[in-house]
C-alpha cells in the first residue's frame, strides 16, 4: 500500500491525470504540447514549431503550431518550445526481474537467495526507472527464474497501480535440460532454473501453450551457448546449438500458430543460423553475425537486437571470449547497417543493473557503430514498434498513443542528449516535467 500511495502522490505532483481512473463521462481532456523541434520517429527530417494536440491517451493532431492552436483553444498547454520532442523510446530487450548478472555468482545470488516477491518489488522499481529514462514501451525478454512475474508487473502498470512502460512480456524463456543456469556438480540438489527446461517436439509445443496461457506476449528461446572463435584463419564466432532443428521449429510453429512472435538468444554464428532455420522473428545479441547470415535476416525481414550496452558491461567481469566478441559485433553491425538490416534498439538492461546505466546509452553505441543519429532514433522508436507489430507506439502521429519525451538539445547533433530526458508523457499522463 505504501508503494502505491507514494506513486500516486508522485503522479499528482507531476500533473498526471486520467490514466489512474476509468475515463469519466464527457470529453477527454485536451492538452496542447508546444514542440520547438519534433522528431516524429518516422520522418527523415525534424520539423520546427510544431503543435501536438493530445486528447485522452492519444495524439489527436500534429502540425504547425499556429494551425493546431486554432483547434485547441480550451487545451491545457505544455510548453516544450525550447526543446526537442520525440516519441517515447522503446527498449526491445529488457529483464525487469534481473539486477545485473556480470558473473555466475551474481546471477545465482538472485535466484537462490531472493524470493520472487522480492524480485518483483525491484521489478516495479525498474519499471519506473525505464519510464523516467523515456522508455514508454519495453519488450521484457524473460524473468530469469521468476516465473510469470513479468505479467504481474505488466498488469500492475496497466491498471495504474504503479508507474511503468507498456510491457510486452515473454515470461520464462526456454532451453533444453542442462543447457542454462543454474547448473551444479551437486546432483543431490534440485536448483532453480533460469528458464523453463524444454525437451522434445511435444514438450516444446506444451511449453509455448503454458507460457501463452500465463500471459506471454512473446516467446523466447536460447538458441546457443558456449561461444568460441575458430582457429585462424577462421575468424568466425562459433557456438554450441541448444535445440535440435525439430524442437526449435516446433517452438516457432506453435508460437506463430497462437499469434505470438519468437525472439531467439543467438550469440554465435551457429546459434544464429539455427534460429534462422527455425523461422524466428528476432535475433538477440547476434555477436557472431556474418555477412551471409545478415543477408538472410535482410531477405526474411528478421530483426537484429544487438544489446551493445550489456556487451560492454559484462566483457570485463566475464573475460575470455566476451571481450573479443564486442569487437567482432562492432564490425559486423557496421556492415549490417550498410546493408540495411533492420536493427532494433535493445539493451539487455537487467544484464547490467537498472540503477547503474541509463538504457538510452545504447543510442550512442549505434551512432559510434555507423548509424546516423536519425537511424539510431528510429531503431528505438518506429522500427522497434514495427518489430512489436504495434502501430500506435514509436511515432508522434494522429491516432498513436500520446507517448512523448523531450530533451533540451538537438539529438541529431549530440546523440547523448537522449540520456538526459527532461519530459516524459505516456498515454497523455505526464511522468517527468522540466
Ligand atoms: Zn537478455
Image (cartoon, rainbow, N blue to C red):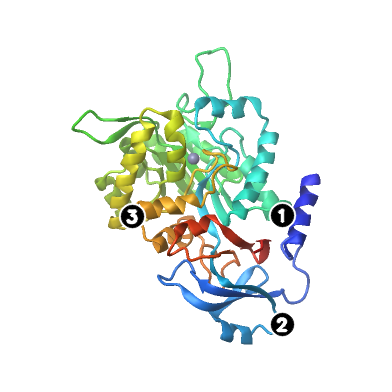
Q: Are marks 2 and 1 in contact (CB under 8 Å)?
A: no
Kindly report the distance in space between the C-alpha atoms of the residues bearing marks 2 and 1.
29 Å
Query: Quick one: SS at disc 3?
Result: loop
Q: Which residue is mark 2?
A: 74
Q: Badge 1, how many Cα within 10 Å: few under 14, some, many 20+?
A: some
Where residue 298 sits in the image (x, y, percent)? 31, 54
Q: Badge 2, how many Cα within 10 Å: few under 14, some, many 20+?
A: few
Is the residue indicated by label 1 positioned so its CB lies within 8 Å of ligand 1?
no
Report the disc number at residue 159.
1
Quadrant of res 325: top left
Q: Nearer the viewer, residue 339 or 82?
A: 82
Left or right placement of residue 410 versus residue 77 in this view: left
Q: Nearer the viewer, residue 98 or 178?
A: 98
Q: Residue at x 32, y 55 (%)?
A: 337
Q: Residue furthest left?
A: 233
Left or right placement of residue 331 versus residue 211 in this view: left
Q: Nearer the viewer, residue 271 or 134?
A: 134
Where residue 71 sits in the image (x, y, percent)? 63, 85
Kindly report the distance in space between the C-alpha atoms of the residues bearing marks 1 and 3.
40 Å
Kindly report the distance in space between the C-alpha atoms of the residues bearing marks 2 and 3.
45 Å
Q: In the image, is residue 24 above or below residue 124?
A: below
Amino acid at each position: 500500500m505504501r508503494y502505491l500511495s507514494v506513486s500516486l502522490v508522485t503522479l499528482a505532483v507531476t500533473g498526471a491525470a486520467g490514466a489512474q481512473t476509468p475515463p469519466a463521462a464527457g470529453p477527454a481532456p485536451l492538452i496542447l504540447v508546444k514542440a520547438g523541434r519534433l522528431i516524429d520517429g518516422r520522418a527523415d527530417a525534424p520539423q520546427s514549431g510544431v503543435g501536438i494536440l493530445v486528447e485522452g491517451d492519444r495524439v489527436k493532431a500534429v502540425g504547425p503550431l499556429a494551425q493546431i492552436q486554432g483547434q485547441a483553444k480550451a487545451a491545457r498547454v505544455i510548453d516544450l518550445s525550447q526543446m526537442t520532442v520525440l516519441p517515447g523510446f522503446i527498449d526491445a530487450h529488457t529483464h525487469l526481474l534481473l539486477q545485473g548478472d556480470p558473473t555466475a555468482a551474481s546471477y545465482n545470488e538472485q535466484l537462490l537467495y531472493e524470493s520472487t516477491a522480492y524480485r518483483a518489488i525491484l521489478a516495479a522499481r525498474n519499471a519506473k526507472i525505464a519510464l523516467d529514462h523515456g522508455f514508454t514501451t519495453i519488450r521484457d525478454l524473460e524473468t530469469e527464474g521468476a516465473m510469470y512475474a513479468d505479467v504481474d508487473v505488466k498488469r500492475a502498470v496497466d491498471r495504474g497501480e504503479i508507474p511503468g512502460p507498456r510491457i510486452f512480456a515473454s515470461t520464462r524463456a526456454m532451453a533444453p535440460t542442462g543447457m542454462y543456469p543454474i547448473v551444479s556438480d551437486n546432483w543431490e540438489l534440485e536448483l532453480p532454473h533460469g528458464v523453463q527446461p524444454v525437451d522434445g517436439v511435444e514438450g516444446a509445443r506444451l511449453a509455448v501453450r503454458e507460457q501463452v496461457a500465463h500471459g506471454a506476449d512473446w516467446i523466447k528461446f536460447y538458441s546457443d551457448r558456449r561461444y568460441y572463435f575458430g582457429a585462424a584463419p577462421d575468424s568466425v564466432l562459433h557456438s554450441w546449438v541448444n535445440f535440435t532443428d525439430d524442437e526449435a521449429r516446433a517452438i516457432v510453429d506453435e508460437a506463430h500458430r497462437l499469434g505470438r512472435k519468437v525472439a531467439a538468444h543467438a550469440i554465435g554464428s551457429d546459434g544464429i543460423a539455427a534460429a534462422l532455420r527455425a523461422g524466428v522473428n528476432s535475433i538477440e545479441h547476434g555477436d557472431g553475425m556474418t555477412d551471409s547470415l545478415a543477408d538472410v535476416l535482410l531477405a526474411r525481414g528478421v530483426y537484429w537486437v544487438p544489446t551493445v550496452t550489456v556487451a560492454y558491461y559484462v566483457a570485463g567481469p566475464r573475460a575470455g571470449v566476451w571481450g573479443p566478441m564486442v569487437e567482432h559485433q562492432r564490425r559486423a553491425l557496421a556492415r549490417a547497417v550498410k546493408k540495411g538490416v533492420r536493427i532494433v534498439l535493445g539493451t539487455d538492461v537487467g544484464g547490467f543493473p537498472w540503477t547503474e546505466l541509463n538504457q538510452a546509452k545504447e543510442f550512442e553505441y549505434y551512432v559510434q557503430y555507423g548509424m546516423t543519429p536519425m537511424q539510431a532514433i528510429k531503431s528505438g522508436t518506429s522500427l522497434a514498434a514495427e518489430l512489436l507489430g504495434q502501430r500506435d507506439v514509436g511515432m508522434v502521429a494522429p491516432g498513436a498513443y500520446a507517448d512523448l519525451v523531450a530533451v533540451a538539445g538537438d539529438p541529431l547533433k549530440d546523440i547523448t542528449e537522449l540520456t538526459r530526458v527532461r519530459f516524459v508523457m505516456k498515454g497523455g499522463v505526464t511522468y517527468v516535467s522540466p
